Amino acid sequence: MNLSLTDLSAQQLRKAATLKEQIENLEREMEQLLGGRVERLSGAGRKPKRKMSAAGRAAIAAGARARWAKIKRAARSTNHKTKPRRRMSPAAKARLAAIARARWRKAKALGRSAL
């Protein structure tokens, strides 16, 4: 929860000041014990944010464009080779039609209006 100093009561401000003072006293004691400057623990362990240069971003973008161009080129070359349509011979059509007519005859004989 982030509170600004204006949102805190006088009692909370006094307590915060006391805590800060205690932390500073403890840090001074540690410096005396260890014989040198003590790093603050609050920001320890954080790595600085890595930044990429404009040249690095441009190189990555160029690589991505090249990859997409290669994929599109491959898709364009295979697009023209379409399979010829399969056609049914008139004899096969007639045979299937006869089977369908027989199926319907049987269904109507049983009094059905749907298969």
Image (cartoon, helix red, strand yellow):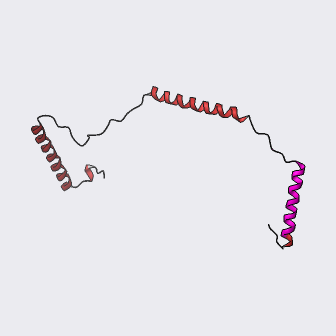
Image location (x, y in percent) of residue 65:
56, 30
Along the viewing direction, whichever of 37 and 115 lies nearer the viewer: 115
Along the viewing direction, whichever of 77 and 51 lies nearer the viewer: 77
Image location (x, y in percent) of residue 31:
12, 38
The outermost residue toward the top is 55
Image location (x, y in percent) of residue 85:
80, 42
For image coordinates 13% across by 44% down, the residue present is 26
Image location (x, y in percent) of residue 112:
82, 71
Please state the extent of the stretch shown in magenta in the rendering.
Answer: 86-107
The vertical placement of 111 against 94, above or below, is below
Q: Does the magenta segment cover residue 63?
A: no
For image coordinates 88% across by 59% down, the residue present is 98
The vertical placement of 79 against 87, above or below, is above
On the picture, is 24 further left or further right than 104? left
Along the viewing direction, whichever of 1 and 64 lies nearer the viewer: 64
On the picture, is 43 further left or further right than 76? left
The outermost residue toward the bottom is 111
Secondary structure mostly taken by the magenta-highlighted segment of the chain? helix
For image coordinates 19% across by 54% down, the residue present is 10
For image coordinates 20% across by 37% down, the residue present is 39
On the picture, is 36 further left or further right than 46? left
Quarter occupied by residue 24? top left
Q: Does the magenta segment cover residue 106?
A: yes
On the picture, is 95 further left or further right than 80? right
